[in-house]
């Protein structure tokens, strides 16, 4: 399982200030800390970028890839920013992402085609609400595959994000059970390998002690791993959650188990 | 998921000495500690009991049920001890257990029939080795069901134990992956609900720090829970592992999630 750091985000005031001031140091520090914590890839989330979108994403991509050769996820709704980030990137890039919203299909998918990169497709209804039945996960996935193929993006370039729901939502647990069922059967449906990613922090949204939030994350992550999740987007500074992510690989993977690789 | 304490076992010298001296106090203390730690049932494991089998199991059952009304698992290869324990029991009893070894089928299954209790069937080859392919898990399960039915024990009385393998075994991870696949598809195969139990401590057999052992247990348990495991046999004094077991129920179950129920 590839661990993608969600830490380089506009919701962190240190990062927000660094973006506003075009100050590379806090961003470089964050990237180095994510690498040290065991990240395999970095999600760059500068928010919706209504102003100076291209300049900001170019600055971020250049700053991050001065520190690491890891893959970068460009995580914004601004197609202008994604295009600028792709032009500036030497590292592998993944576009994060598109959905069945007509504007996102129209703006994002051609960038994946032009630059020949992977793109994340969210399992959301066109109105951005989440499905709760496994059948609807499948229907939306087939629509995402069709939209991608229509834009010239082949299925091997698509990474499906089934969008983990907060447990405190009325339908949160039902949604997440359907998500597991979907993940484990997705390749039978697609008739082909189908990459997947999930963001873990959403699970524990709401007011609760950090220890309880980490406990539910550590409990749900192995369930997704056993269902074949390929990539997890998570706070890599939660060392105990990251340790579970690595233990998942040793238990579900083809590697030879060794105690030295655990913990 | 029902949490069965594996702590009342002959491998603990305190319990071994208490059995040898017919001293109820250390046994009663252990049962109270298991109840306080959140156990839902108690496994009584006095070893193979080559001498005084009936007397020892009667003493244990009477001592344990003086402390709790929880279900008791009678965990020994001595059919004489199981028969005595069943005769002495007021609490619900589960026989733990039988396998395709001809002697175990012959001795244990009639007791389940006579006393009308549930019985655990181990997914082991007749020579007691473990399968590594999901297909063989299914074949052995069908043979266990057939053996039970031949003895008049209906499928709803059967609890399948797919026997977790130590990760350090050459085929340990392959076996445990097949186990997950078996668990999640077992009811489609059986064409009926089919109860399941797994012992968690076997997973981390071998020399390793306790923290690493608990980490792999906490990682594998949610995988089994998502695959529909009904009962887990575990060291309930590992509070962090027990907390994960309870979190599994809140994530995979039909209950309304609440942060107050976590941790």
Image (cartoon, coloured by chain):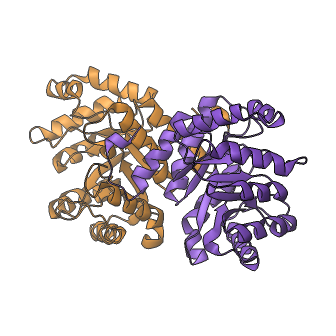
Chain colours: A purple, B orange
Name which quarter of the figure residue A132 lies in: bottom right
Position of residue B90 measured from the top left corner of the image (x, y, whole percent): 36, 39
Q: Nearer the viewer, residue A256 or B41?
A: A256
Q: Name the side, left or right, on which B5 lies relative to B258.
A: left
Q: Name the side, left or right, on which B69 lies relative to A24.
A: left
**In this rendering, does residue B257 appear at all?**
no
**In this rendering, does residue B90 appear at all?**
yes
Position of residue B91 measured from the top left corner of the image (x, y, whole percent): 38, 40
In the displayed image of the protein, which residue is found farthest to the left?
Answer: B51
Position of residue A210 measured from the top left corner of the image (x, y, whole percent): 63, 30
Q: Nearer the viewer, residue B168 or B52?
A: B168
Residue A117 drawn above or below residue B38:
below
Q: Name the side, left or right, on which B166 lies relative to B67.
A: left
Position of residue B62 measured from the top left corner of the image (x, y, whole percent): 29, 32
Image quarter where the C terminus of chain A lies is top left
Residue A248 drawn above or below residue A120:
above
Q: Nearer the viewer, residue A237 or B158?
A: A237
Q: Residue at x 69, y 74 (%)?
A: A153
In the displayed image of the protein, which residue is found farthest to the top?
Answer: B25
Q: Residue at x 82, y 59 (%)?
A: A79
Q: Residue at x 74, y 36 (%)?
A: A206
Total marks shown come to 0
């Amino acid at each position: 399982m590839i661990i993608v750091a969600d830490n380089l985000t506009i919701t962190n005031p240190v990062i927000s200030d660094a973006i506003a001031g075009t100050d590379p140091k806090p961003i470089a520090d964050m990237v180095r800390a994510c690498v040290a914590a065991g990240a395999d890839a970095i999600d760059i989330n500068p928010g919706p970028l209504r102003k100076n979108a291209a300049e900001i994403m170019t600055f971020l991509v250049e700053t991050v890839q001065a520190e690491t050769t890891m893959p970068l996820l460009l995580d914004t709704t601004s197609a202008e920013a994604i295009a600028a980030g792709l032009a500036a990137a030497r590292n592998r890039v993944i576009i994060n992402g598109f959905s069945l919203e007509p504007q996102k299909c129209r703006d994002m998918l051609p960038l994946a085609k032009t630059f020949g990169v992977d793109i994340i497709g969210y399992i959301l209804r066109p109105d951005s609400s989440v499905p709760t039945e496994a059948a609807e996960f499948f229907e939306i996935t087939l629509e995402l595959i069709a939209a991608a193929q229509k834009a010239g993006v082949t299925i091997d370039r698509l990474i499906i994000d089934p969008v983990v729901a907060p447990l405190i939502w009325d339908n949160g647990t039902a949604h997440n059970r359907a998500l597991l069922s979907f993940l484990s059967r997705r390749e039978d449906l697609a008739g082909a390998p189908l990459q997947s990613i999930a963001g873990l922090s959403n699970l524990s949204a709401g007011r609760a002690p950090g220890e309880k939030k980490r406990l539910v994350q550590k409990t749900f992550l192995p369930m997704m791993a056993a269902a074949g999740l390929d990539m997890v987007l998570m706070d890599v500074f939660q060392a105990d959650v990251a340790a579970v992510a690595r233990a998942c690989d040793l238990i579900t993977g083809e590697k030879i188990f060794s105690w030295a690789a655990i913990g």
